[in-house]
């Protein structure tokens, strides 16, 4: 199963040197469970071309808040609504679950 990791921020440098950035952290955490991963650095405006690029999606944490005016927030919210409408599995960690709630009207 292909999992798209939507990286919404970068981990602190001290963490990156030990565990990698957020995308790598989740790949390592879920290793051995039969998943293939593609990491999209949405915080750097790198988005998937389609919701069908993965069979499931994971949105990482971020130091940013969902209500802040960052360029990646509006297209991420649109992507979340599309994923939801297509009933593709989606989960969020910290910032991830907050932006899902915000995008879906919570």
Image (spheres, grey):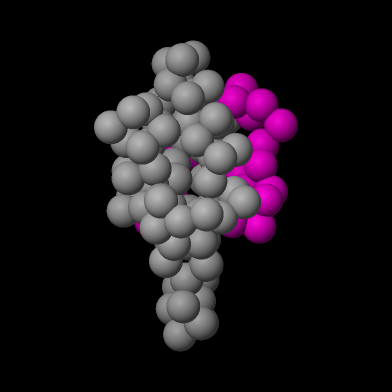
Name the side, left or right, on which 53 lies relative to 103. Answer: right
Outermost residue toward the left in this view: 106
In the depicted view, which residue is nearer to us: 46 or 106? 106
Q: Is residue 26 above or below residue 105?
A: below
Q: Residue at x 66, y 42 (%)?
A: 47
Q: Position of residue 59 (x, y in %)?
A: 44, 45
Is residue 69 shown to the viewer in this render? yes
Q: Position of residue 4 (x, y in %)?
A: 55, 39
Residue 75 part of the magenta segment = no
Magenta region, residue range: 29-53
Q: How many marks?
A: 0
Q: Residue at x 44, y 41 (%)?
A: 58
Name the side, left or right, on which 104 lies relative to 74. Answer: left
Q: Residue at x 42, y 66 (%)?
A: 63
Q: Position of residue 88 (x, y in %)?
A: 45, 21
Q: Position of residue 25 (x, y in %)?
A: 45, 62
In the depicted view, which residue is nearer to us: 98 or 16? 98
């Amino acid at each position: 199963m292909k999992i798209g990791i939507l990286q919404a921020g970068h981990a602190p440098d001290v963490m990156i040197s030990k565990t990698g950035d957020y995308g790598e952290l989740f790949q390592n955490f879920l290793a051995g469970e039969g998943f293939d991963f593609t990491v999209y650095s949405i915080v750097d405006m790198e988005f998937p071309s389609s919701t069908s690029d993965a069979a499931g999606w994971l949105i990482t944490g971020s130091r940013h808040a969902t209500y802040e005016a960052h360029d990646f927030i509006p297209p991420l919210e649109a992507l979340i609504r599309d994923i939801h409408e297509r009933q593709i599995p989606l989960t969020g960690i910290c910032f991830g679950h907050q932006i899902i709630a915000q995008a879906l009207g919570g």
